[in-house]
Image (cartoon, rainbow, N blue to C red):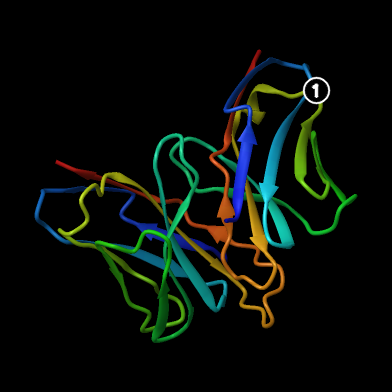
Amino acid sequence: DGGITQSPKYLFRKEGQNVTLSCEQNLNHDAMYWYRQDPGQGLRLIYYSQIVNDFQKGDIAEGYSVSREKKESFPLTVTSAQKNPTAFYLCASSILNMPPLLNEQFFGPGTRLTVL
Amino acid sequence: EDQVTQSPEALRLQEGESSSLNCSYTVSGLRGLFWYRQDPGKGPEFLFTLYSAGEEKEKERLKATLTKKESFLHITAPKPEDSATYLCAVQPHGAQKLVFGQGTRLTINP
């Protein structure tokens, strides 16, 4: 079954700790994305990557870091510098079209992070 | 600045009562518009892609339409299982990133 997996489903963190959220896809997609979702707000882009070993900041990258060492994997680290990290985190992937054609993104099931 | 606004924020319908959800957008050229369904605590599920004014797409009780300034998601004779949050996103011309609206929370009462 092709798809996107995220783990863990729920994550609890103490203030001052870094945590890493996992995202894996077996769709052979080139591009991967991390979004944050807060109640009553649209999805906000944190980071995205179009190719292995390269990534770009999105609209709210402060306090987050990513890596893209493999095409299938795009982990997100929420650092202690992120002031309000409690949220629902979504990973997505898409085929990379050049020039940018339709970017149909497919999402994983999400990770809910709670800071205690 | 590219912007997407969805209305209403929340909508309650009786089973079988048809209605429409709105997605208004302002972008510097539209490459595509996407509709997603999101159940509580889950990731968005892809529904439709629209890319030219006048285009329509259908799936079961849902029909999405597109004009130059907005998109509608029409739901015909809805059932309780259609209850979800519906998200709209636009892709500006020349861009890889999507801009999302805040969603419409739809509740269908039996």
Q: How many marks?
A: 1
Residue at the bottom extreme of this rendering: A53
Task: In the rendered view, tell whether residue A14 sits above or below residue B85.
Answer: below
Specify the quadrant that holds the N terminus of chain B.
Answer: bottom right
User: Is B59 on the left-hand or right-hand side of A72?
Assistant: right
Residue A110: percent from left, percent from top: 41, 51
Residue B79: percent from left, percent from top: 71, 23
Residue A9: percent from left, percent from top: 34, 49
Residue A53: percent from left, percent from top: 39, 86
Specify the quadrant that holds the C terminus of chain B.
Answer: top right
Q: Nearer the viewer, residue B4 or B61?
A: B4
**Residue A30 placement: quadrant:** bottom right
State the residue position of label 1.
B77
Q: Nearer the viewer, residue A18 or B29?
A: B29
Q: Amino acid at mark 1?
A: Ala
Instruction: Give me the chain letter of mark 1.
Output: B
Task: In the rendered view, tell whether residue A84 sits above or below residue B39.
Answer: below
Q: Residue at x 38, y 80 (%)?
A: A68
User: Is A72 on the left-hand or right-hand side of B23?
Assistant: left
Q: Residue at x 58, y 60 (%)?
A: B98
User: Is A106 on the left-hand or right-hand side of A8?
Assistant: right
Q: Residue at x 9, y 55 (%)?
A: A16
SS under mark 1? loop
Q: Residue at x 19, y 62 (%)?
A: A79
Give neighbour class at mark 1: few <14, some 14-19, many 20+ (Cα, 10 Å): some
Task: In the rendered view, tell whether residue B2 sits above or below residue A49.
Answer: above
User: Is B95 on the left-hand or right-hand side of B54?
Assistant: left
